[in-house]
Amino acid sequence: MNCPYKLIALDLDGTLVRSDQCISQRTVDTLIRVQEMGVKVAVASGRPTFGTAHVADALHLEEFDGYVMSYNGGEIYDWRTKVRLHAQTLDEEVIPYIYMYAREHGMPIMTYIGKEVVSEVEGNEYIQYSVMRNRMNFRKVDDFLEAVQGTGIVKCIIAGDPTLLPALEAEMQETLKGKAGAFRSEPFFLEIVPMGIDKAKGLSILLDKIGMKREELIAFGDGYNDTPMLQFAGMGVAMGNAAEEIKKAADMVTWSNNDDGVAIALENLILRPLDKPY
């Protein structure tokens, strides 16, 4: 295969996945074709690992020795063997503080353990949104701190009123400085994650483990958390639906997630050049 690219990293929401939460057949077919040529595919998402499983299976990552990089780079799996190649977890001393902070502000806290969304609060609309989007089971627990102890939590989420979370985000960023990161992944989700996590660092770790170079990487994304990997990759591709500053950080801009943007870019970058008779 005379192709300069050996790995494709794909953000999910707003990139690979359309607004209807589906992946177009054209995009699936294109990704299977490039994998048949020997190019590896890695899902690179902020979602929990098992919240990406249905996407990994739809793309046949197990068959083609692909990878899942979840939690914005906090966890990396070889999807064929299901061996965890890398994990970065929250300091256990930070979790009780986050828990008490959420309770004091009257907001539910949740996390992900295996295939489950775990919280003390049942029926909350924001938590149910996470259960639905990630296609995971919900488990109500009586004692959140006891349930998460020793499980290696990658992130906790405080779910709440979008009008209140910006101030809480700024407060937690200051309080947790040097210990954990805090940011809103949705207007109603305040995520607390280990220090130093981002998709570029995660992909750098993956490339080292599989013996590839950043110049051989194509990365697709649309969000602010995708910017580091778009700048890191040999070819960073921003979606047409991305904000202008994200597009400026990329090497090229493709069509939107609702218009087969991933497929169109791969057809131009990989498939059509190889079809040429020279």
Image (cartoon, rainbow, N blue to C red):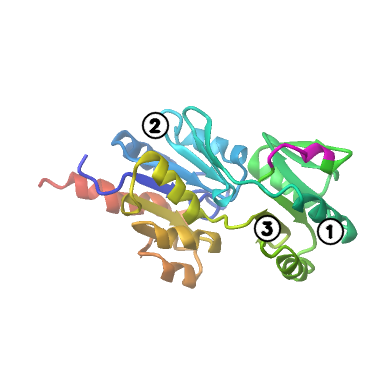
- Between marks 3 and 1 in the image, the one whose residue lies nearer the viewer: 3
Circle on res. 101: 1
Percent coordinates x, y for residue 265 in the rendering: 34, 54
Q: Amino acid at mark 1?
A: Tyr
Q: Amino acid at mark 3?
A: Ala
Q: Counting other residues with Cα less than 10 Å from the Cα at mark 3, is it few (<14), some (14-19), or many (20 or more)?
A: many
Locate residue 53: give its quadrant: top right
Q: Secondary structure at mark 1?
A: helix
Mark 2 and mark 3: Cα distance apart in space: 35 Å
Circle on res. 274: none
Q: Is residue 178 above or below residue 76?
A: below
Between 246 and 19, the residue placed more toward the observer is 246
Q: Disc 3 or 1, which lies upstream in sequence?
A: 1
Magenta region includes residue 148: yes
Magenta region includes residue 154: no
Q: Residue at x 15, y 47 (%)?
A: 276
**Magenta-colored span:** 146-152
Between 132 and 43, the residue placed more toward the observer is 43
Q: Residue at x 79, y 36 (%)?
A: 139
Q: Disc 1 or 2, which lies upstream in sequence?
A: 2
The residue at which mark 3 appears reads as: 180
Percent coordinates x, y for residue 72 in the rendering: 56, 51
Q: Amino acid at mark 2?
A: Phe
Between 118 and 22, the residue placed more toward the observer is 118
Mark 1 and mark 2: Cα distance apart in space: 44 Å
Locate residue 31: give its quadrant: top left
Circle on res. 64: 2
Q: Is residue 24 visible?
A: no
